[in-house]
Image (cartoon, rainbow, N blue to C red):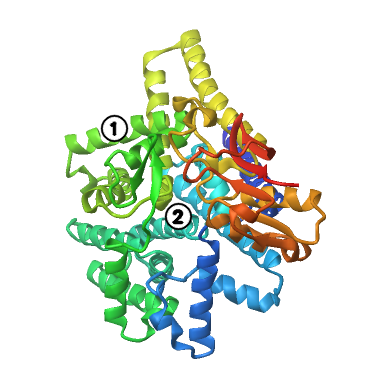
Amino acid sequence: MVKGIAMVCQSRDVAFERLAVGSFFLIFLLIGLEVFRDYGLSTDEVFNREKGFYSFYYVFNGDNSLLTYYRRDYGVAIELPLVIIEKAMGLSVLRDVYFMRHLCTFLFFYVSVFFFYLLCRRFFGSWKLALLGCVFLVVSPRIFADSFYNSKDIGFMSALLISTYTFFRFLEHRSLPWLVFHAFASAFAICTRIAGLFIALLSALFLALDGCKKRTNEEGMPIHISLISYAMLSSLFVMMLWPYLWSNTASHFAYALKSSVEFTRFNETFLYRGEYIDVYNRPWHYIPLWMVITIPVTYTALFIIGFSSSVFSLVKNPLGFLADRGKRDELIVILMFSMPVIAVLALNLAVYGGWRHLFFIYPSFVILALMGLRRALSFIRSRFSGRAYRLAMASFLAVILLDVSSVAAFMVRSHPYQNVYFNQLVGGVQSVKGYLEYDMWGISYREAIEYIMERDKSELVEISVDNWPGGVNQLILKPDDRKRIRYVDQKYAKYFLTNFRWGYDYNYTNEFYAIEVDGAKIMVVYKLRD
C-alpha cells in the first residue's frame, strides 16, 4: 500500500512537472509568434543576409565572388540556411524577408532554451531549478530583444548552448550517436562564429582528462578512439557547413582565425562613461561594467555567490574534479564563463556595442547563478528552523520573485525596446543619458519612420537620419511607404531622425515625435520645415 501511494505521488509530480514545463514553453512560443514582427532592423542585418547570399551563389551557382568578398571570413551556418529558406519560400518583398529572418532567429533561440532546460535538469537534478534557469535566460531584456534580430550573437549563443548539452552527454556516454551529435553541434557553433573552437578544445581536454582516470567496467568508446573520432568528424562537419573552406581549407581557416583575433574592420568611436572612446582602446572594465548594469541585479548577486563558492571549492581541492562528476561539471561551467572573458582582456580583442559579443557566456552565467541560489537555500536550511526558517525562506524567494517580476514588467511596457534595459544599480534607463548609449543598433528608427509615413501623405517625404540604421530600416517598411521616402542631407530634409548614437547636441527645437522608454528619449524626430 505504501509503495502504491508513493507511485501515485511520483506520477503526480511527473504530471505537474510536464504541465509546468509545457506551459512555460507554450507561453514562450506564443509570445515569440505574437511579437516577432514588432522589431526594427539592426545595423548588421543587411550584412548578415549579404554573407548568406555570397555563400549561396558560391554553392548553387558556382560564383567565386565569395573568395574575394571582404566578409568571407565569417561562418554562415545560420545565414546560409536563412537564404535557402528565403529562396524556397519565394520571398520577394524585403519586409517579408526580414520578418522571416526575425522569426527563424527567435525559433532557433527557442530551441536552444529547451536544450538549456535539459542541461540544467541534468546538472541540478531538479526540474524546478532547470525551469527557473530558463526563466532567468528569457527574462533578460537585452537577450530577449536580440533573440529576434541578432542572428549573429544570439545565434552563436544558441548554437554554443546546444553544443554544450551534447558535450556533457558525450562525456557521460561516449556512444556513437552522441559522438555524431556533439561533433555536428560543435561544428555548427564554429561555423556560426569561429570562437566556437573553444567548445572543441574543452571537449578534447576533458576527454583526455577522463583518460587519466582509472576505471573498472568502463562503458562507451575508449578515450583515444573518442578523441580521434571527435576531431575527425567535427572537422569534416566544419568543412561541410562552411563553403569558404571548400577550397584551400587550411589557409582559409587560418585567415578566418587570424581575422577574428586581429579584427580591424570596424573603426568607430562609442560612448562609454560620458566619453567617446576608440573601439580598439577599450578599458579593461568595459565588459564587466556593461554586464553588471544590464543584467538583472538578483541574477548577478546569485552569480557572485555561485561563482565564488565554486572557485573556492575547486581551489580547496584542485584535483577533486577527476573523481567527482559534479566537481568536473562545475569546473567546465566556470571555464566556459571565464575563458572568453580572459581571452578578450588578455588579447584586447575588438568588443563593442555593450557586451553583445560575449552573450554566449550568459547561459554559463545563469547556471552559476543557479548554483548560488542552491547554496543560498542550503545556507538558510542550515541556519534557521521552524518559524524563522519559513520567514527567511519566504523573504529570500520573495526578493527573487519581485525582481524577476519587475524585469518582466519592464519588458512588457518597453516593448519592443527591451534592448535599452539598465538595472537599478545605475537608476534605470533615464539615469545613463550622456553616460552610455541607448539604442546602439537603431532598432527604433523603424517606428519613427512609420510614424512619419502614416501622418505625412506627401508624394515624396524627404528625411535625414543620424546614422546608418536609419537607412537600413526602410527595408522593413511597407512597399508603398518605401517608394515615397527620399533620404537627403539635413539642409534639404523635412524631418531629421536621431537615436543619439553620437551625441545629444542638436539645435533643432521642433520635436515632431519621440520614443521614450521609462522616461528616457531613445529616438526623436524633428520637423525641420512644413
Cα–Cα gap, marks 2 and 1: 24 Å
Q: Residue at x 23, y 59 (%)?
A: 205
Question: Horizontal and vertical percent for residue 177?
Answer: 43, 70
Q: Callout 1 environment at 10 Å: few (<14), some (14 to 19), or many (20+)?
A: few
Does residue 293 sit above or below 206 in this rendering? above
Question: Horizontal and vertical percent for residue 101?
Answer: 61, 63
**Residue 270 visible in image:** yes
Residue type, mark 2 in image:
Met
Q: Is residue 509 left or right of residue 315?
A: right
Q: Residue at x 46, y 36 (%)?
A: 295
Does residue 399 sit above or below 288 in this rendering? above
Please tell me in which quadrant of the rendered image residue 286 appears.
top left
Quarter of the N terminus within the rendering? top right
Q: Is residue 530 left or right of residue 336?
A: right
Mark 2 or mark 1: which comes first in sequence? 2
**Residue 5 visible in image:** no
Q: Is residue 63 left or right of residue 482?
A: left
Question: Horizontal and vertical percent for residue 296?
Answer: 48, 33
Question: Horizontal and vertical percent for residue 128?
Answer: 53, 37
Q: Residue at x 61, y 53 (%)?
A: 491
* Residue marked by disc 2: 157
Residue type, mark 1 in image:
Ser
Q: Residue at x 34, y 44 (%)?
A: 277
Disc nearest the viewer among 2 and 1: 2
Check residue 308 in the rendering and tell me which mark sits there, or answer none: 1
Nearest the eye: 393 or 402:
402
